[in-house]
Amino acid sequence: MLAGLYSLVTAGVTLILGVLHIINFAQGAFLMLSAFLVYYFGTLLGLDYFTSSVLAVLIVGGIAMLTERFIYHRFWIKGEVLSCLVVSMGLTQIIQNGALVTFGIIQKSYDSVFTGVFNIFGVRFSFERLMIIVFAYLIIFSLLLFLKYSKRGQAMRAVAQDYDAAQLLGINTKRIAMLGMFIGVGLSGAAGAIVAPVFSIDAYMGEFLMLKAFLVMVVGGLGSVIGVIYAALIFGMFESFGLMYIGHMTNVYLFVLVVLILAVKPTGLFSGTVFQIR
Amino acid sequence: MNKTANKLGIGILVTIILLSVPALLNYNPFYLHHITIIFLFSIVVLGYWLIHRTGQVSFAQAGFMMIGAYTTAALQMHLDFNFWFALFLGGVTASIIAFLVGIPTLRLRGAYFFLITFALCEIIRLFFANAFIKTFGGVEGIKDIPGPGIIEIPYIFTLDFNKTMEGYISYYYLIMFFFVISMLIMWQIDRTRIGKLIVGVKDAEELSESLGVPTMAYRVFAFVLAAFITGIAGGLYAAFLTFIDPLAFMIVHSIEYLSYLIVGGPTSVWGPLLGTAVVETIGELGRGLGLGEFILSGFLMMLVIIFFPPGIVGIPKVIKRIINRRRGIIEEEEDEGATTA
């Protein structure tokens, strides 16, 4: 389950890194925002889970698109990566603490959507967690298909490879950049909507997932979506078993492991595989 | 000759002002505390400034501060170390961690450094919150951290860190002293060849590499030195507040320090001090905001980077340019080269 979640979050970051060549730290904040939106749509407006999820993803993606158009664009077009980072950090700060102030510090919990337990070979799974896995991989594979076969997806890969050349070929690069931002943040929004019924919702939930997303991204190789999926699998397994046998220190060991991997094979374990965006 | 005399005069003046600040504030503990905190955070932001000079942004500064604070506190309380030695070891530990992490990440181009330092900050926090709970106090943190005790130089001054009121003044002098030292170090770095090379590493990496400048070594050096200073600042923080817990060193705080730097302006050594002073003071005026302080700092940071990237230190330059342009319009007929030169 964790693996599916991580790959979903990381794929969003990777996509934006691939297309816009910037790292959007605000993804975690958007994830949290989406989870909160799902919660409030459900409790205040009485919408059902799926409608509110779709709405939340659209809203979050829309906000991100606006930030791209009005804030990020002027920086990344000139290659000022540092300024982009600073902006995304400021954005994170505002959204996260804004959420803390407006939504309160008490953790919210959304009612489970899927209930029930089933057995596979004597191991008990909750139906809910299975649905997370199914949805996460469904979204990821539709993203891969989109990038590979659709016209927009091909245009996006072209922009990722060479901005100027893509512009010369008549691709509306501005629109593609906005679309990339929309999809990238939309993925985190989807992740937020998916975890809303399972995890408790609080203002800092995004930060923890971003931490994992970054580590997964480094191991998977920057800019490779397939690498991210493999790396997320490894991470999810390591963490699930680690929490059982090692305890709270798992994350520390995991980090040391990542730094070692980086020292030995800096390009990540799975770089150069197919479906590389960049 | 005249220039050196001028410099000496300015130095003495600054020293006198810095020394007389407690008296000027009428020994008001609130203002003293505020100013001490400004100096303390300025040390951290100075470290940030050095890293920013090499063209990187580190998330891990709050983490290094945490290492310094916890090392200083734990060594004193459990192994009965001397304060000064514990403080030094706190800085050293932070810089060792920075070295170990910096070597593999700074070697690479691109985003690796940001990603890894982000993770590092959180990992350090998790470590101190979950590991060796007897030593580090777990989530509850460490309280009643001892300070440096009494420093006495006969007939000149006595600093008593144990009493409440005199403690405030003493801590002001102590932290101000460390700030001035780190400021001098950074100023020297900025002024001399190292500083020029560091800027070269940022602006023209390939060029400096082709000229035989070990770019990676400079980046690692900047990162490690920044971590050392930050670790020391963390130790001072622990002693000054006598209480630390894992919630005081989150990524949010790293971002806040970055906002100080951005608001102050990363181009000059004075940026960190000015930025910290301005943002902290604004935050203090809006004390009732609580968490709004973070929103405010994030907001200020974004405003500055979007509309006025040079920051506060850039203001005099802009004013000068405006004045020059006004004059330039008048003088244009006489001397065209004056404005461009």
Image (spheres, rainbow, N blue to C red):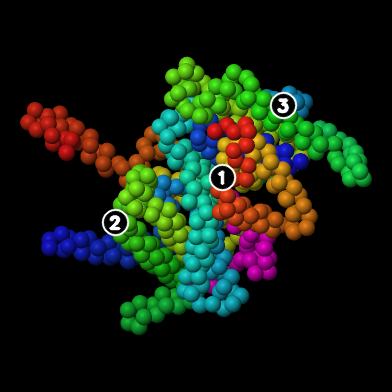
Looking at the rendered structure, the kind of residue marked 3 is Ser
Rounded to the nearest angstrom, the CA distance separating label 2 from label 1 is 33 Å
Q: Nearer the viewer, residue B211 or A164?
A: B211
Secondary structure at badge 1 equals loop
What residue lies at 18% left-to-right and 35% top-to-bottom? B340
Looking at the picture, does residue B272 appear above or below residue A7?
Answer: below
Residue B9 occupies which quadrant of the picture? bottom left
Question: Residue A52 bears which disc, if any?
Answer: 3
State the extent of the magenta-drawn residues as a range. B119-148
Rounded to the nearest angstrom, the CA distance separating label 3 from label 2 is 59 Å
Question: Residue B193 bears which disc, if any?
Answer: 2
Looking at the picture, does residue A257 appear above or below residue B297?
Answer: below
Instruction: Label the magenta part by its dominant secondary structure.
Output: helix
Looking at the picture, does residue A242 appear above or below residue A53?
Answer: below
- Residue A176 spot, x, y in % from top left: 53, 23
Looking at the picture, does residue A94 appear above or below residue B254?
Answer: above
The residue that mark 1 highlights is: A267
Secondary structure at badge 3 equals helix
**Label 3 is found on which chain of the structure?**
A
Secondary structure at badge 2 equals helix
